[in-house]
Amino acid sequence: MTMIFGVPMAALMGQLLIGLINGSFYALLSLGLAVIFGLLRVINFAHGAQYMLGAFVALLLLTWTGVNYWIALILAPLIVGTFGALVERTMLSRLYKLDHLYGLLFTFGLALTIEGTFRYFFGSSGQPYPTPPALAGGVNLGFMFLPIYRGWVIVASLAVCIAVWLLIEKTKLGSYLRAATENPVLVQSFGVNVPLLLTLTYALGASLAAFAGVLAAPIYQVSPLMGTNIIIVVFAVVVVGGMGSILGAIVTGYLLGIAEGLTKVFYPEASNTVIFVIMAIVLILRPAGLFGKDV
Amino acid sequence: MSHSDATAAPAPAAVQGATRIKAVILLAMLGFLLLVPMFLYPIFLMKILCFALFAAGFNLLLGYTGLLSFGHAAFFGGGAYFTAHAVKVWGLSPELGILVGVIGAAGLGLIMGLIAIRRQGIYFAMITLALSQMFFFFCLQAAFTNGEDGIQSVPRGIFLGVLDLSNQINMYYFVLGVFLLGILAIWRIINSPFGMILKSIRENEARATSLGYTVARYKLAAFVMSAAIAGLAGSVKSLVFQFATLTDVAWQMSGEVILMTLLGGIGTLIGPVIGAGLVVTLQNYLATSPLPVTVITGVVFMVCVLLFRRGLVGEFYASRIGRRLGFKSDS
Amino acid sequence: MSALLNVAGLNAWYGESHILHGVDLHVNEGEMICILGRNGMGKTTTLRSIMGILRKRTGTITFAGSDMMTMPLHKTARAGLGFVPEERGIFASLSVQENLMLPPVVAKGGMSVDEIYALFPNLHERRNSPGTKLSGGEQQMLAMARILRTGARCLLLDEPTEGLAPVIIQNIGTVLGELKKRGMTVVLVEQNFRFASKVADRFYLMDHGQMVAEFPVGDLPANMDMLNRELGV
C-alpha cells in the first residue's frame, strides 16, 4: 500500500475528499453571506437556518408530494429565496439605517425561531434523504473509491460558485450590484430600483444557502440543527477570507475545507477547531483577512 | 421649538426627582431581594441572580463600550468549569474556588480579547463567536470537563469556614451578596474616569483615538473586566446548581445573554437585571411545554430589534413619563 | 408655469441643521442656468433636494409637470432629471465602459455610445481600465458622459470644474456648449463665474440658503462689483 508521510494513500485521499466536500458547502455558504453582506451590510445569521430549510423543503417535497431530487434542487432554493425576500421586505429592510449589529441580532432571532419551529414539528433527530438513483454507487479511481454523489456535490457547488461569480462580475445586473455596494444612493438616483435590488440580493443569498442544503441532504441527516454548527464555522471562513471579495469567499471556503480534512488525517483531535485556529492566526498576521481590503 | 426644548432638558427639580425615585426603587428592590426567598423557590431566585450578574457584566461591554460579543458563554461556562474543578477535585473552599473561576475567565478574556479587538463591529461579533465555539470544542474534548457529562455533584462547601452553603437560604444570601458586589463594581467602573473614556469610545472611536487614548488598550481592559464578571456569574452558578456542563459554554448561552440585555435595555444599569429576570422566568414556564424555548426567544429577539431597541428600561426612560421624572434616555 | 423645472419655497435639512430657507428658482426648456455662491450657502443641497437624494425637505418642486416631492428616488431619473455629483461618483469596482453603461436609458434622444466616445476620445482609449484609475478630469468627463447616454432632459451639474487644470476646464466648456446646441437644459453650480459666464444664460446668487439675486448673462458686467464682494474673490 502506498504511504505518504506515514499515512496510507487511500486514507489521505479519503479525508481530502471529505475536506473538499465540506469545502464545497463552506464555499457556497460563505459566498451567499458575502453577497448579502456586500450590498446589505447585514451578516445573515439565518444563513444556517436557510441551509436547513433547503434540506427540509427537499425532504418534505419528496415525502409529501413525491417530488424528486432534481426538481427539489431547483424548487427548494426558489421557495426559500421567496421566503427570504418576504423577510427582507417586511422586516429586515427597516434596519438598514441603524447600526449594522441590529441586522445581525435580527437574523439571529430569525434563526432561533425557524430552528425552534422545526424542532417542534420534526424533533431534533435527523432523517435520511435517499441518494438520487442516477447518482448512486461509486467508481474506483485506483487509489480510492469515489462515491458518485460526493463527486457530484463538488462539481455542482463549483459550477454554482462560478455561475454566481460570472453573474456579479460580467453581467449588467452584476454591475448594478457592484455599484450599489459602493454608493447605493447614487445608483438609485440613476433610476435603478435599489430597494428591489436589495430584496433580490437577500433572496439570492438565501437560495444559495438552500441549494447547499439540498446538496447536503443525501450526505448528512436532515435535521433542524444541521445549520447552526456549520454557520459558526462559515463565519470563521468569512473572517479568514475577508468580506471584500466574492472570489475570496469561494477560494477560502474550499481551502479551509481541505485544511480541515488534512487535519483529520494528521491530528484528528484538532479537526473540530482547526478552522478557528487558522482564523486566530490570520487575525494576528493579517487582520483584514486573506482577500480583504478594509482594515 | 420651545416645546421640544422643554422636554430635551429636564428641569433641575426633575433631575433631583429622578435621583430620588432611583434611590427609592433601589431600596425597595433591596428589601424585595432580602425578603423574597420566603415566597419563591431560592434556587429559582439564585438562577435569576446569576444570570442578572452575567447580563450586567455583558452590558459593561455592549452598553458602555459599544462592543457586541457573541462569545460570552466561554467566560460564563469557563468560570463554571474552573470553579467546579477547583472545588471538587482540588478541594478548595468556595471563596477560593470562585477566585479561580474569575481569574480563569479573565485570562480567557485576555486571550480572546487580544485576538478579537483587531477587528470592529460585525467582525468583532463573528470572531468572538468563533473563538467561543473553539473553547466549546476544547471543553468537549478536554479531560477535566468530563465531556458530555460535565462536572457533577460539585460540593458547595462552607463559606469562610463559617457559613454552610448547603443550606438553601444561606446559599441564597451568599449569592445575593456576590450579586450586589458585582453590580456595585460595575457601577463604580462606569462612573469612573475609565468608564467615561469607554463611553467616548462607544460614541466615536476615531475621536477618542485623536484625543490621544490608546483605544485598543481600553477596549481590551473592558473586555477582560466583562469576562471576569461573566466568569464570576458562572462560578457562582456552578455552586448553586452543583454542576458545570457544556450548556454553559454553548453559543446559545451567548445568545441568551444578548437577549436579556437587549430586552432589559442596552446601556442601562438595571435593564440587564430585569431582562435576565424575565428570560429566566419565561424559560421556567416553558420548561415543561413541548414548544422549544428558542421559538419564543427568537420572536422576542426580532420584536425587540424591530420595535423596542432601547429595551424595556430604556423605553421607559425615553417615554414621556420617564422624561418628566428626569431620566435621560441615553444614559 | 411654462418653465421645465419649478422650485418654490424649498426648505431642506441635514439631520437637525436647517440648510435651505425657501429657495425659489425656475429653469426654462433648453436654458442653462448657473447658481453662484460661496461654500456652505446651500448650492449642492439645492441640487440634491431637487434630485430627491435629500428627502428631508418641504416646499414644491415640479419637473415637466410632475410633482417631484412625493416621487421615490429611483423614479426621478425616469422623469428626466440627471445628476452629476461634485465628487463625481465613479465606481472603483466597475470598468470605464461599465461605468458609462451603468445608468439605465430613460428616454429616447440620448447620445449613442459612439457619439460619446467621439466627444470624449480619452474614455474610449481607457474603456477597459477601472473607473477610478482615470485622472480627475477624465472622471468628470465620464460622470457627465454617462448621464448624456440616458436621454435625461435636464442635467444637474455640481461644480464640474473644481480642482481641474485650465485646459480641462476649457474642454468641459466645449462639452457644455455642445449640449446647449442639442437643446439640453442644465442647472450648473459653480464658484468659477468666469467659466460659467461663457456658457450660462442666467445666474442666481445664493446666500444662506436663499436666492438673493437673479440676472441674465447680459447683466453680468453690471453685477460684477456685487459678485466680487459676495463671492469674496
Image: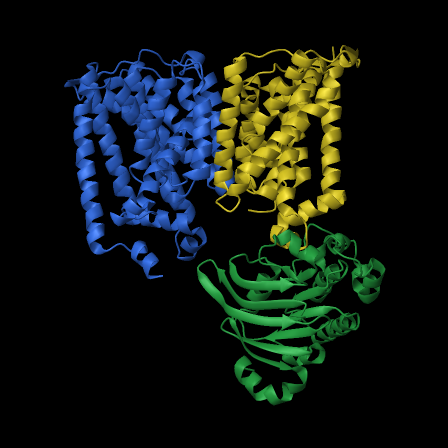
Chain colours: A yellow, B blue, C green
Q: Does any portion of residue C202 appear in the rendered image?
A: yes
In the orientation shown, which residue stands out farthest toward the left? B162
Compared with B115, B50 (above or below) is above
In the orientation shown, which residue stands out farthest toward the front? C1
Q: Does any portion of residue B229 appear in the rendered image?
A: no
Residue B301 drawn at (x, y percent): 44, 31
- The reply, left or right, for residue B18 in relation to residue A206 is left
Towards the viewer: A272 or C138: C138
- The reply, left or right, for residue A168 in relation to residue A292 is right
Occupied quadrant, residue B272: top left
The image quadrant where one finds the N terminus of chain A is top right
Compared with B135, C19 (above or below) is below
Towards the viewer: A20 or A278: A20
Towards the viewer: B291 or B171: B291
Q: Residue at x 34, y 30 (%)?
A: B230
Residue B101 drawn at (x, y percent): 32, 25
Count of labels shown?
A: 0
Occupied quadrant, residue C166: bottom right
Towards the viewer: A61 or A177: A61
Compared with B53, A126 (above or below) is above
- The reply, left or right, for residue C14 in relation to residue B75 is right
Residue A2 drawn at (x, y percent): 74, 13
Residue C172 drawn at (x, y percent): 73, 71
- The reply, left or right, for residue C31 in relation to residue A84 is right
Q: Residue at x 51, y 42 (%)?
A: A95
Occupied quadrant, residue C150: bottom right
Q: Residue at x 62, y 68 (%)?
A: C6
